Amino acid sequence: MTSNATPLIEFKGVNKWYASNGYHVLRDVNLQFAKGEKVVICGPSGSGKSTLIRCINALEEYQEGTLTVDGTVLGDDLKGIDKVRREVGMVFQQFNLFPHLTVLENLILSPTWVAKMPRKEAIEKAMVQLERVRIVEHAHKYPLQLSGGQQQRVAIARALCLTPKIMLFDEPTSALDPEMIKEVLDVMIELTSQGMTMLCVTHEMGFAKAVADRVIFMDQGQVVEQAPPQQFFDSPQTDRAQDFLSKIL
Ligand code: ADP
Ligand code: MG
């Protein structure tokens, strides 16, 4: 990222506590993401990775600091939150598809209801995205008739239907059988070649090495290290990162 470019996403001194138990989950997070950047976020379970990326599309609130997404400061302004949600697509570990809707119906739901797109246009766009994730032949099936890898590719296509500027992935391959991981990663790698800004929580280090501009390592709610993948994997600077890597590599 050039130093004078305005970041697409910026965390400035962000702190978050969970209201239910007072847990201090994000501790003074300062991060910038440039347009088009691909970033992998890793760290031990419970370190705050999901919370961090959920803040970016306002699925979570924060209490201190400033989080700016594409020029909008996320706070109490509901209009701003709507704008940001339209620009940010998210893919979850558990796919979160509607089981009683076909693949195609899952894809056109938000475009027709939220974005008020005419149905015919929504279907055309959905079919393009299903081509992109190579699943077009299953458009009229129900999610549970598909494998996990296919369902996750449908979830990716669904997020793409709203033409997001930013895609967030939260451990997209963690719930998949090993033989299905590659087909999902391949689709994600293809997206990176199309200039999409991508933040991905994953422990797939091969993916990180292949596509990430930067790896962020979190522990106990803090950003502990960030470096290009080669540098992070070959010479982690902190004991915490070394310890983490020794467990996953
Ligand atoms: P990660 O994705 O790195 O595993 P999370 O962001 O899911 O971490 O969670 C970080 C910490 O916050 C965990 O200790 C978790 O128990 C806690 N936490 C997550 N969600 C909530 C919640 N809704 N209420 C209270 N604590 C939570
Ligand atoms: Mg998580």
Image (tube, rainbow, N blue to C red):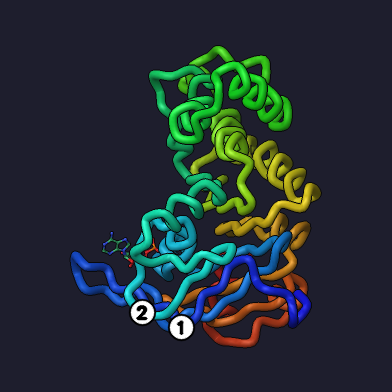
- Amino acid at pointer 2: Glu
Residue 41 vs residue 78: left or right?
A: right
From the top left corner, tell me how far across and down residue 183 is, in percent. 69, 36
Between residues 88 and 157, which one lies in front from this camera angle?
88
Answer above or below: position of 213 versus 109.
Answer: below
Find disc 1 in the rendering and name its residue: 13
Image quadrant where residue 129 sits: top right
- Residue at 65% in and 39% down: 184
From the top left corner, tell me how far across and down residue 72 is, in percent. 51, 64
- The reply to whether residue 220 is in sight is no
Answer above or below: position of 173 versus 69.
Answer: above
Mark 2 lies on a secondary structure that is strand
- Residue at 75% in and 51% down: 192
Residue 72 vs residue 77: left or right?
A: right
- Residue at 49% in and 17% down: 102
- Residue at 47% in and 56% down: 57
Checking the image for residue 64, the label placed there is 2
- The reply to whether residue 18 is in sight is yes
Mark 1 lies on a secondary structure that is strand
